Amino acid sequence: MNWDPPNVNAHLKLVAPASACNLSGVLRQAGVRAEELEDNLSNFTADETIQYQFTGTTYEPRISRSGTFEYVAILTPMPWGASVQEARTPTKGTRPFPATAWDRGLPGLAFIFLPKLQAGYDMKCDGETNWKGQLSWVIHFEQRANAKGHTWSYTDSSGGVHVARMEGRAWVRAGSGEIVHLETVLLAAIPEMHIRNSWFSIDYGPVQFHSRPVRIWLPQFAASYTEFDDLDDHQMIIDHTFENFLLFSVKVGQQIKPPTQPH
């Protein structure tokens, strides 16, 4: 596992300049797709593989683990949208390890584009580029200083919640509005958690419902990089790979429960 956090201000090879971008139209389409994700995120299960590496100042692996889990996303309605939690049941041969509880709610980062949350960010279009064969408008976003933080937070050992202000950019598929890739970085350190900086990189891909003609773009791969300012300047990398998706329609009166003994 290599330390390779995304640079959200890196130069882009453009196929169309920012001046050609209809920002309001792109954000409107992205908002529709974010609402679809919100509506359907808890309607799927997947197999998740987690790889974890924790290093010190010598940049040699100190702790390295991996495991596979049955994954279910759990959405709790909130006034601004939904809070994303997760249930992970270890598959045979996997034992839980602390990193499985660190990156909770990664799929919900795309909720930045929910219409009711977009106002909390300054957004601009950097231009159009090609992301793995998909022509996409790159939208740069930065959380406003006076806006309430609903995107990401960290919880310390005593239960205190520390809001993480973020900036980043998203590759929004031209013509349809699906989020195909998203990158973020912290705008400020979180001293209460000894976090100097943190980055996320998420790839999304299409997943087809079996019971109805609906296709939703869901996370396929996510990587997080965290840099700590403790005495040994630790670094942590966590990779998440999702596969074998099973999407289902929830019928009236039907109750879908997460796996037993969530971790």
Image (spheres, rainbow, N blue to C red):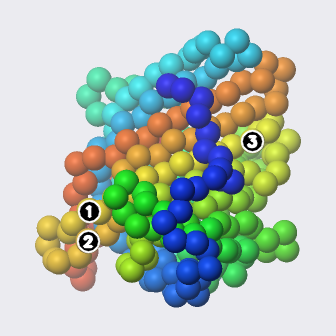
The residue at the point 35 percent across, 71 percent down is: 40
**Amino acid type of the residue tagged 2 in the rendering:** Arg
- The quadrant in which residue 178 appears is bottom left
Q: Is residue 58 above or below residue 53?
A: above
Question: Quadrant of the image for the C terminus?
Answer: top left
Kindly report the distance in space between the C-alpha atoms of the residues bearing marks 1 and 3.
Answer: 32 Å
Q: Which mark identifies residue 181?
A: none
Q: Which mark identifies residue 197?
A: 3
Image spot of residue 201 (x, y percent): 54, 48
Image spot of residue 224 (x, y percent): 57, 41
Q: Which sits earlier in the primary sequence, circle 2 or circle 1?
A: 1
Discs 2, 1 touching: Cβ within 8 Å? yes
Tell me the element at label 1: strand
Kindly report the distance in space between the C-alpha atoms of the residues bearing marks 2 and 3.
Answer: 35 Å
The residue at the point 45 percent across, 30 percent down is: 51
Q: Judge by depth and name the residue closer to the eye, 16 or 204.
A: 16
Q: Is residue 212 above or below residue 83?
A: below
For disc 2, the marked residue is: 215
For disc 1, the marked residue is: 207
Mark 1 is surrounded, within 10 Å at the Cα level, by few (under 14), some (14 to 19) or many (20 or more) other residues, namely some
Kindly report the distance in space between the C-alpha atoms of the residues bearing marks 2 and 1.
Answer: 6 Å
Q: Judge by depth and name the residue closer to the eye, 248 or 177.
A: 177
Q: Is residue 14 above or below residue 155?
A: below
The residue at the point 58 percent across, 72 percent down is: 17
**Amino acid type of the residue tagged 1 in the rendering:** Val
Q: Is residue 103 above or below residue 126?
A: above
Q: Judge by depth and name the residue closer to the eye, 143 or 259.
A: 143
